[in-house]
Every structure is written in C-alpha cells, then in structure tokens.
Amino acid sequence: MVRDGDTVALEGFTHLIPFAAGHEIIRQRRRNLTLIRMTPDLIYDQLIGAGCAAKLVFSWGGNPGVGSLHRLRDAVENDWPAPLALEEHAHAGMAAAYAAGASHLPFGVLRGYLGTDLPKYNPKIKFIECPFTGEKLAAVPAHRPDVTVVHAQKADRKGNVLMWGVVGVQKEAVLAAKRSIVTVEEIVDRLDAPPNAVVLPSWVVGAVCAVKGGAFPSYAQGYYPRNNAFYKQWDGIAREREGFQQWIERHVMGTKDFDGFQRSLEAAVKHA
C-alpha cells in the first residue's frame, strides 16, 4: 500500500509511534517519499538515512530528551544519502492542516505565524482576512497523504480500531488519507472502549496488521513502557554514516519482520 513517490504520514505523538511499519517501508526499499509528521524522531531518522525520503513536512525534529537526529541533519547539510527538501510548520499549523484534510477542506486556518520568520521560509503559509471580523489569520494547505500509518492498542475482527492514552493527530491523519494502515498490539473479538478513547471505524481503515510491540522503542499505554535506553543509544548509532548503515543492515534489512528485529536487538545485547 506504500508506493515509490507517495506522500506518507506515520503519526504518533511520543506514544504509539509506528516503528514496525517504518521498518517495513525500509525493507521494501521505497524511494522518493514525502514524509509528513508532526514530530519526526527516530523512525524518520532511520527512513531518511536509509534513502527512502525526498521531502520532509514537519513541525519539530529531534531525538526526544537526547539531541539531534544525525541522519536528518546529514541529509539536509550534505545531501546524504540523498537531498532532502524541507517544509516546516508549527505544531498548530500541522494540526490545522490535518484537520482540514480530514474535513475535505482545501486549507486550515489558525491564529499563528504573525510576527514570526517562518512564513519567509515556507511559502505555503499564507494570510487571509476573516470575512466576519476582518482579523488577519494564517492559512496552510490541507494535508492529504496518499497513505497514513498509525499504531494502536487493539482492533476487532471487523477492522475497527481502538487507541487510548496520549494521542496526537492520528485520527485526523487517517481521515485525511487516501489509504490507511493500522498496526495493533492485538486483535480481539470485542472492543470495550473506555470513555474518551479514539475509535477508528473500519470504513476508514484500509488494512489492520497485528504487530505485537510494533511501537518499540516508544510506548503503548497499557502494554509496555518507553525504552529510554534505546533513545540514548540511538545518538551513537546514528552519529556516523558507517555505524548507521551497519545497524540498518543487521537489524532491519537483515530481518524478516519486526519480531525478527526485536530478537536481533536482544541477541546483540547478549553478545555485547
């Protein structure tokens, strides 16, 4: 469902980040992707370093609590492994763009960007006048990904998806997309949704894949915690091209699926 040249959003806000799906995109050697994400972190560093990306549409990028994304920085500064175009927004702008896409509107509107330098560097940020108050407002084009991928806790056998805990723009990103893929911790007979949980109905979901642990090293509320050690280790792994390539070849390209990836990491720790 992910094709060369697609615009792809892999969304998750600190929580339920779809690492397993990102690795499969790398294994399939997808190229020339436009990657959208409100907070690109490690999985986008891996996708960029593996040569999958041609453009990044984002509002913040980094290794949370640690520092830079070295593969992202290398692509921007040195065109390695390929040039990477950037389209930068604020969080509010990204959220407005997803909401507009989910509503099938051409653009999102927000109070923001006035008095900032970002519109100088992103020509897609425009300003409009409110027809009711005359107020000057910012407008951003709607996000309409070819494919959105998210991770969630559960799906039922009909394809309805349940997620809870810290959620960001996953629902809007799925509704805005032409196609969608959801990886889940488990498939169950019945979804007993707690109050204020997010339920994606089967008719907006293109495919459901059971991938236990598929958000590692981020966390899945109610299933496993965030692996902070991995985030710290990634800084050293990704800092140099050779070390990054060796890691990707061993743990991602050299494994069949995400279960194999996790076993590969465990084996590396045992032999360290």
Image: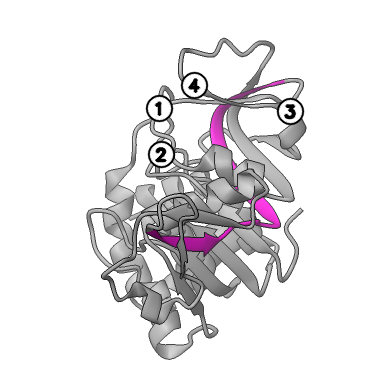
Read off the residue under disc 3: 202
- Residue 45 in percent (x, y) is at 44, 65
Dot 3 amino acid type: Ser
Say what secondary structure mark 3 lies in: helix
Read off the residue under disc 2: 15
- Residue 208 in percent (x, y) is at 70, 35
Say what secondary structure mark 1 lies in: loop
- Asked if residue 95 lies in the magenta stretch, the reply is no
Q: Is residue 257 visible?
A: no
What segment carries the magenta color? 136-156
For the residues marked 1 and 3, what is the alpha-carbon distance in whole angstroms? 21 Å
Q: Residue at x 24, y 64 (%)?
A: 67
Q: Nearer the viewer, residue 64 or 136?
A: 136
Within the image, what quadrant is residue 181 found in? top right
Dot 1 amino acid type: Gly
Q: Which mark is residue 197?
A: 4
Query: Magenta region, mostly helix, strand or loop?
Result: strand
Q: Residue at x 30, y 58 (%)?
A: 233
Say what secondary structure mark 4 lies in: loop
Q: Quick check: 1 left or right of 73? A: right
Q: Residues within 10 Å of mark 2 (few under 14, many from 20)?
A: many
For the residues marked 3 and 4, what is the alpha-carbon distance in whole angstroms? 16 Å
Q: Earlier in the sequence, mark 1 or mark 2?
A: 2
Read off the residue under disc 1: 165
Q: Earlier in the sequence, mark 2 or mark 4?
A: 2
Q: How many marks?
A: 4
Dot 4 amino acid type: Ala
- Say if 45 sits above or below 170 in the image: below
Q: Quick check: 62 left or right of 36? A: left
- Asked if residue 145 lies in the magenta stretch, the reply is yes
Q: Earlier in the sequence, mark 3 or mark 4?
A: 4
Of tags 4 and 1, the one toward the viewer is 4
